[in-house]
Amino acid sequence: MPLLKNLHLHTNGQLWTPKMWGTISRDVRQLVKSTEISIDAASSETYSINRRGGSFERLLENLEFVSTLRRNGPLERVTISMVVQENNFLEMPDFVRLGQRFDFDTVYFSQLVNWGTFSEKEFTNRAIHLPTHPRHSEFVDLLKDEILYEKLVYLGNLIEITSHV
């Protein structure tokens, strides 16, 4: 594909190690210009629930490696993302700090969407963004935290909730 100019990777970051990176040809590595790493937690405890089978410690090591690819190339943009739900919304400020720690470009938050993954009951128990959720007002209060308005933060489809804050 001689006209291919760049690649975007969307990953959970668990296997993005120097060894794995080294197995990709140099020509292809140079095309990887952006990535989004879906994390959904800022603590080991929450990560073990939301990313079953993943290791938060391994993730942190791999984020360190990815940050060197951002500093030295070829990466031009790194985004980490969190689907916000009842069990992780209190970690939003720490998630921003995680992005700052590695000097990433964007920390992206989005509301939970049920793509058929959950029963209706489980979804409504998790969906902190819904006004009917018992902890919704606590979530709305958290959205007032100044760190969520740092330049690197993108509140995605949660932005409509902040208009009421």
Image (cartoon, grey):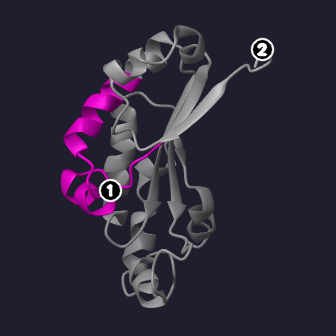
The stretch in magenta equals 37-66
Any mark on residue 2, and which?
2
Q: Horizontally, is 52 left or right of 38 in the view?
A: left
Q: Establish if 77 lies above or below 54.
A: above
Residue 156: % across, % down: 60, 56
Secondary structure type for disc 2:
loop
Q: Establish if 62 lies above or below 56.
A: above
Which amino acid does the dot numbered 2 rest on? Pro
Q: Horizontally, is 41 left or right of 108 in the view?
A: left
Main structural element of the magenta stretch: helix, strand or loop?
helix
Residue 39: % across, % down: 39, 49
Q: Residue at x 38, y 34 (%)?
A: 100
Q: Nearer the viewer, residue 133 or 145?
A: 133
Q: Residues within 10 Å of mark 2 (few under 14, many from 20)?
A: few
Report the label total: 2
Residue 157: % across, % down: 61, 62
Which amino acid does the dot numbered 1 rest on? Arg
